[in-house]
Image (cartoon, helix red, strand yellow):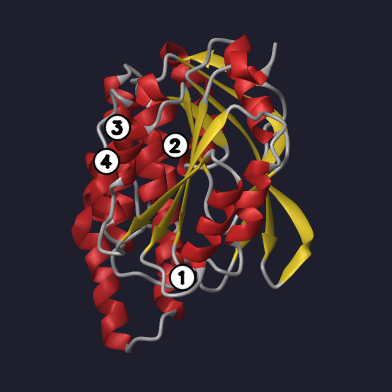
Amino acid sequence: MTDDNRPLVTIYTQGYNSEPYIAQCIESVLAQTYTNFEYYVCNHGSKDATLSIIEKYAKQDSRIHVMDMPNSARGFYPEYILEHGKGKYFSMLDSDDYITEDCIEKLVTFAEDNDLDMAFGGIYSFENSNPSVITVSRQLDKELIFDIKDNSKYFSQVYDFMRTTWGKVVRMDAMRKADYSTYKQNAQTFICDDTAFTLANYEHCRRIGGITDCILYYRYTDTSVTAKYNPALPENNLNIFMQSDRLLSNIGDNSDDSYKYIIATYLGSVIYTGYRILEAEMSASDKIAEVVKIFKLGLLKIIGEQGLMADEATL
C-alpha cells in the first residue's frame, strides 16, 4: 500500500525564538519514511530568525503550512488544527526536539493495525550542552494495547507517557470530543499545558496502545519554559490533578490504585515545585509565600481526604 492510500497525518510544531533548533526539527519531519502528512509550523512571536527558517522550508516542500501568531495568542492551536487540519491522526513535535525517520510510520501502522485512537512510543533525551550523550527517559518493557474500560489495569504504566503532547499520534475524531478548558487555562503560562491537552484527548479514546521503540529525541535546554521556576506552577499542577480526577470518574475508573497514583504524582509535583522554589532567585520571604500558596491551593485538603500524614507524603 502506497502512502497516498494511507491515512493523512496532521503534524504541528510551534516555535518561539527557536532559531538554533527548528531546522533540525523540520528536517526530521521531512525525512519521514511515512510521507502522507501535512505539517503546520507556527512561529509564535519570535524575535529571531525562526519565521524566515520556517518560510525557507515551506518554499521547498508544499506539505508545510506556515503560521505566524503573536506571542499573546495562547492556547489556540487545538481549535486551529481541528478547523484546518485534514488528517485522520494528529501528531505534535516541539521545535527544539526531533523524531526518528520511522516515527510516524511506526505509530500510524500500529494504530491502524490495532484500531487505536492513540498510539505512543518511547522517548530519548539529551542535554543541549552535550547532544552526543543520549539516554532513554520513557520506554515500555513490552508492547501494550488496551480498551479504556480496562484503564485501571494499565493506568500507572501509561500515565507518564500522557504528560507530554509529543511522542504519539491521536485520532482527530477523539480530539473533536475533548474538553480543552484546563489546557487553555494552563497554556496562558505555558506550564503543564502539554499534560492537560493529552489527558483531554485520552478521556475520549476507545483503545490505546504503546510500542517499545523510542521514536523521539527530547532536548533539555537552560532556556526552556520548564527550566526555571514559574509562579503559576503550583496552581497548574493542581489543575492537572483535578483534571486527572475528573478523567477517572468520566471513564468509570473507580479503582483505588488509579486514584492513589494521581495522588502520588501530584505529591511528586509538589516536591519538584519545592526544589524549584529553593533554587529560584527570590527573597526568603517570597519563597515562604510560594510554599504557603501550595498548601492553600489544596494540598492540605487532598492529604486530609486520603488520611495521610505529612511524613507519609515525604514533604
Q: Mark number for residue 83?
A: 3
Choose mark 3 or mark 2, whichever is in front.
3
Mark toward the start of the polypeptide (2 vs 4):
4
Q: Say which of 237 and 293 sits in front.
A: 237
- Res 168 → quadrant: top right
Mark 2 residue element: helix
Choose mark 4 or mark 3, whichever is in front.
3
x and y percent of residue 207 in the render?
A: 48, 15
The residues bearing labels 3 and 1 have C-alpha atoms spaced at a distance of 40 Å
Mark 1 residue element: helix
Which residue is denoted by mark 2 in the rendering?
261
Mark 1 residue crowding within 10 angstroms, few (<14) / some (14–19) / many (20+): few
Choose mark 3 or mark 1, whichever is in front.
3
Q: Are marks 2 and 4 in contact (CB under 8 Å)?
A: no
| Picture layout, residue 248 above or below residue 193 | above
The residues bearing labels 2 and 1 have C-alpha atoms spaced at a distance of 21 Å
Q: Can residue 307 be seen in this view?
A: no
Q: Say which of 277 and 216 sits in front.
A: 216
Mark 4 residue crowding within 10 angstroms, few (<14) / some (14–19) / many (20+): some
Give left or right: position of 43 versus 176.
right
Residue at x 44%, y 28% (from the top left corner): 257
Which residue is denoted by mark 4 in the rendering?
242
Mark toward the start of the polypeptide (3 vs 1):
3
- Res 261 → quadrant: top left
Mark toward the start of the polypeptide (3 vs 2):
3
Mark 2 residue crowding within 10 angstroms, few (<14) / some (14–19) / many (20+): some
Give left or right: position of 16 versus 243.
right
Q: Mark number for residue 275?
A: 1
